[in-house]
Image (cartoon, rainbow, N blue to C red):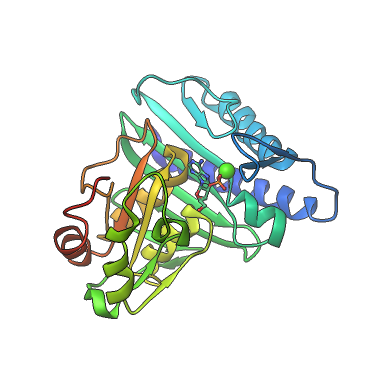
Amino acid sequence: MNWEQIYSHAKEWVNDAGAKIRLSFDKTLNIQTKSNANDLVTNMDKEIEQFFISKIREVYPDHKIMGEEGFGDTLGSLDGIVWLIDPIDGTMNFIHQQRNFAISLGVYENGVGKIGLIYDVVHDELYHASRGNGAYLNDKPLVPIKETPVKESIIALNATWVMENHRIDHNLMIPLVRDARGTRSYGSAALEMVFVAAGRVDAYLSMRLSPWDVAAGAVIIEELGGIVTNLRGEHLNFLSQDSLFAAKPGLHQSILKDYLKEGKW
Ligand code: 2AM
Ligand code: CA
């Protein structure tokens, strides 16, 4: 398999897709809801996913595709080469802010992440990695992730997990929020993961994400020595929804041991 060629195509298509999204800012968006009133999708989410699918099908007809908007394949396994695509991660931000969203593209082989690209379209910043070949922000290499204690860490998490919710006992999150130096919430899992990769935040926690939200970020973070699991500390399967806990090495172990151990995740 020519991974260099796949990497190069992925970068080219992500750049082209970003250009299409930038052009869309001057046009009227068609906004619809999905599972609930706050679960939004636009014509651009669908168009960009279809753009990737048409390119992949043309050049790599034997590859499989898992895309958020459902234009790809229905997969029961990650056998073979699978592209995991979130055409716009942070759709609510895309609609309300025209920033703080990203394109997320992961390429996996038999369930192992080989290539990850996360494109911050508005800032023209492409975070990318291919397994074993380093991670980059545009052309600049990202440095390996350093360790940080909880009391000096900035933790990305959504405020909804610290108020009463039906997924976890929110009281379990309070000590972590109290002990950390600070918390942040950006509204795009892909961006929050590359912020861990770039050392801008030290950990990112979410109670429920889909494979396309995290597939690319996991490749980039792991390439830099960071740890990506669910909140129970288990490997992700990239086939079903799960919680997410991405963090610096050391910090990942101490948060799991000291804060998450009693959790019902
Ligand atoms: P999206 O914009 O592609 O839907 C917001 O905190 C983050 O969680 C975004 O990355 C968003 O991705 C994701 N997200 C929002 N609702 C979700 C849901 N119901 N299931 C999984 N991920 C979701
Ligand atoms: Ca999306």
Residue 97 location, quadrant: bottom right
The answer, for residue 87, to whether it is visible in the render is no
Q: Is residue 139 above or below residue 70?
A: below
Residue 257: percent from the left, percent from the top?
14, 60
* 51 lies left or right of 72: right
Q: Quadrant of the C terminus?
A: top left
For the point 51% across and 26% down, which residue is it? 60
Q: Quadrant of the N terminus?
A: top left
Residue 236 location, quadrant: top left
Residue 43: percent from the left, percent from the top?
74, 38
For the point 85% across and 50% down, which residue is it? 27
The answer, for residue 95, to whether it is visible in the render is yes
* 29 lies left or right of 95: right
Q: Is residue 161 above or below residue 41?
A: below
Give 160 or 27, whichever is nearer the viewer: 160
For the point 36% across and 35% down, which residue is it? 238
Give 17 or 173, whichever is nearer the viewer: 173
- Which residue is at the far right? 27
* 117 lies left or right of 28: left
- Which residue is at the far left? 257
Question: Quick check: which quadrant has ligand 2?
Answer: top right
Residue 163 location, quadrant: bottom left
Residue 141: percent from the left, percent from the top?
40, 67
What is the count of numbered marks? 0
